[in-house]
Image: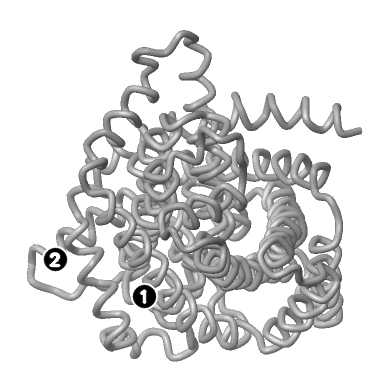
Amino acid sequence: MEKIVNAVSGVLTDYVMVTSLLLVALFFTVATKGVQFRMIGEMCRLLVRSGRNDSSANGKHHHHASVSSFQAFAISIASRVGTGNLAGVATAIALGGPGAVFWMWIIALLGSSSAFVESTLAQLFKVRGEGSFRGGPAYYIQKGLGKRWWAVIFAVLITLTFGFAFNSVQSNTMASAFEECFAFPREWTAIIISVLTVVIVFGGIKSISRFSAWVVPVMAIAYILLALVIVCMNITKIPEIFLLIVENAFGFGQAAGGAVGMGIIMGVKRGLFSNEAGEGSTPNAAATANVSHPVKQGLIQTLGVYTDTLLICSATAFIILCSGMFLEGHDGIVLTQKAIDTELGGGRQYGSIFVSIAIFFFAFTSIIANYYYGETNIRFIKDNEWLIQAYRLLVGGIVYLGAVMSLDLVWGFADITMAMMTICNLIAIVMLGKYAIRLLKDYQNQKREGKDPEYHTSTIPEISNQTDCWPE
């Protein structure tokens, strides 16, 4: 079974998904005239404003919503920032070489255009839910394309991938880190994580958004500060490390050209697992936000890709490359732990302890956000409270099992469902992308007129009956 799963996973993820991601990212970069580059200032302004004053300009339109733009951003960051940032980057470097870091940067820079489009579409086609809005690819596939069967397939795939498979990976990584560092029994870690998960998810989206908005920024800043300290300690090595990354990315000085291909594959795969641009997951969080124009949340979510890959993933990469531990045969979270131990020079009690604590918070917030992606898609298929309660308990059980078992087979299935989910979403956003581009033009026109942009259904009248969350 493992051989079959790995073979199918290899074809889907290494070739079909990687190629599709790059092509769609290039397409939207051109179609939006590089929105992810030319509107960085606007992204930062919107994020600061949403954190300081939650949607003050649009309360008259969206009394129903209770999740702020910043909280929606925090939920998506909570899902993005997890084991992919610490363990995934290490695996990419271990298997693809330092050049994999370059390709992680490329997929983040280009893929952020796809992130803008999918999150903008999620806002456009969102629906009213219990206490907040709901939306995502399943919703815009059904409402924008009129294909419920396609939408249901996506909803099933994202629930299997995030609600179950990825959450098993997150809990397993936490248990491994604590067992390695503190010799803490995996069973006890599993019980603690599963109980905390059930307590928070039964609190609903408000509980999830509050928890994520507080924990994620604190841990991300702490980890980036640690990386900055290590980079400053090795400041003379930085030009050499940049040169090492670029040389390996293009195979300069390498004996085998195959190493370049592996670097591209691993960089794009682990970059996607970390930043999720184009995958179809973060639009589920983007849709919950209370904003006056869909483009506002699209821009904020684009900034999330940069936060994840260009800041946090790069922090891990520089720690590992500065230490030189990637040449010692280590992999995954162990490589990151040993790299920090080496750089701090104080033994395992410093690096391993910090990484164990960081991975606990990063992975746990990912579990909570991943759970929500499953819930919103289960509600799409059938909005039944008994079904949701069963799903919540099942997630708690899966988190426990993931912490105590080997996940080689689960990873294979996760890669397959992730690839299928991503391909479903990429096809949909290519077909619906024209609406996101029209919204971007409308937003820019209103900004030039000195207005705080607001969207009205008359802007795109042909779909007004499918966008009933917006004013006429």
Report the quarter where the C terminus lies. bottom left
**Label placed on residue 447:** 2
In percent of width and height, residue 67 lies at 47, 83
Residue at position x 74%, y 59% in the image: 172
User: Is residue 308 something one can see in this rendering?
Assistant: yes
Helix or strand or loop: what does disc 1 sit on?
A: loop
Q: Quadrant of residue 391?
A: bottom right
In percent of width and height, residue 194 lies at 78, 76
The amino acid on which the numbered mark 1 sits, given as a three-letter code, is Glu
Confirm or deny contact between disc 1 and disc 2 (CB under 8 A): no
Helix or strand or loop: what does disc 2 sit on?
A: helix
69 horizontally vs 146: left or right: left
Residue 82 vs residue 329, the one in the foreground: 329
Residue at position x 73%, y 46% in the image: 414
User: Is residue 434 something one can see in this rendering?
Assistant: no
The amino acid on which the numbered mark 2 sits, given as a three-letter code, is Lys
Q: Give the distance between the C-alpha atoms of the residues marked 1 and 2, in whole angstroms.
A: 20 Å
**Label placed on residue 410:** none
In percent of width and height, residue 32 lies at 27, 43
Residue at position x 77%, y 73% in the image: 189
Residue at position x 28%, y 88% in the image: 53
Residue 470 vs residue 370, the one in the foreground: 370
**Label placed on residue 472:** 1
Disc 1 or 2, which lies upstream in sequence? 2
What crowding class fits label 2: few (fewer than 14 Cα within 10 Å), some (14-19), or many (20 or more)?
few
What sort of colour scheme is used for the picture?
A: one colour
Residue 431 vs residue 378, the one in the foreground: 378
